[in-house]
Image: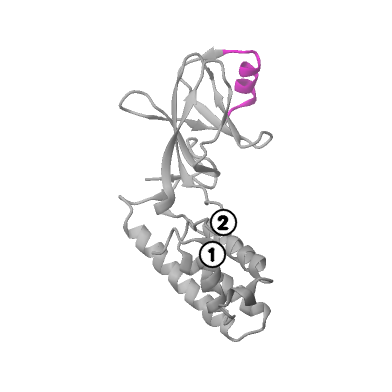
Amino acid sequence: MPTGVQLSDMVRDLRAECGHSLQVAHGVNSQETLEYYLRRSQEMIYAEADWPNLRLRDYVTLNPGQRFYSYPVKLSHDNINKMYLSNGSCPQALLYGISPQEAWDSDQGVQSWPVQKWQDRPDLVAQFEVWPMPASGGDLIADGTMRLKPLVAPSDVCTLDSTVVILRAAAEILAHQRSPDAEIKMQMANNLMRSLRSQQSSQRQGPWSMIGSGDSTARPGIDYIP
């Protein structure tokens, strides 16, 4: 699957899919518009599906007395599936959700070990809270989905399959132009999308299932068990 394709090449291919001239001088005025459609197309595709090939784990260093932590740079903070405490050879899954009483304990400066819970803090900038505040240092393992790479500069590369991103963008542009080809491009994009998801699902190491609401280790709506 063509990942890692540069934005400049994607713009060229998008022009071709839309039937536009490939001469650079002829497309200067539409350059920013085409780049915008490609960025939005990739963002929408990223949000529509679980992408096993983008799943990774990264570390967060715990410090004594520190309550709030930034999410790992490589991970999308909206798609952290689980947090684990690195505890020797057997990582311990943290529960999701901190009660008002537990938050009050932290307000009072109570420290303990091990860390047992975590919770997103939407009132802070891309940060989460742990409980109890750690009394010693350690590491958390964040399991989640890799962030999309920037798609702004000509040399920036796509994170997802460039063909499905281009086809989806072309379908929208052609729809605005009332072109009959719009439906064809969208069908091609949807067929490729299904194929990619099927291929990636078959490569998973064992079945994944949605965690039920009764499992308090889950972050509501996004947690999966490998």
Location of residue 179 with respect to 67 vertically, above or below:
below
Q: How far across and down, in percent of the image, does residue 220 sit?
A: 55, 43
Residue at coordinates 63% horizontally, 75% vertically from top-left?
25
Q: Quadrant of the C terminus?
A: top left
| Label 2 sits on residue | 151
**Is 19 positioned to the left or the right of 123 in the image?**
left
| Label 1 sits on residue | 8
Q: Magenta residues: mostly which secondary structure? A: helix
Q: Mark 1 falls on what kind of element?
A: helix
Amino acid under label 1? Answer: Ser
Which quadrant of the view contains residue 43?
A: bottom right
Which quadrant of the view contains residue 105?
A: top right
**Is 169 positioned to the left or the right of 2 in the image?**
right
**Is 134 positioned to the left or the right of 39 in the image?**
left
Residue at coordinates 58% horizontally, 32% vertically from top-left?
128
Q: Is residue 28 magenta?
A: no
Cα separation, mark 2 vs mark 1, equals 10 Å
**Magenta region, residue range:** 98-110
Neighbour tally class for label 2: few under 14, some 14-19, many 20 plus, Cα within 10 Å: many
Which quadrant of the view contains residue 34?
A: bottom right
Q: Quadrant of the N terminus?
A: bottom left
Front residue of 204 and 20: 20
Neighbour tally class for label 1: few under 14, some 14-19, many 20 plus, Cα within 10 Å: some
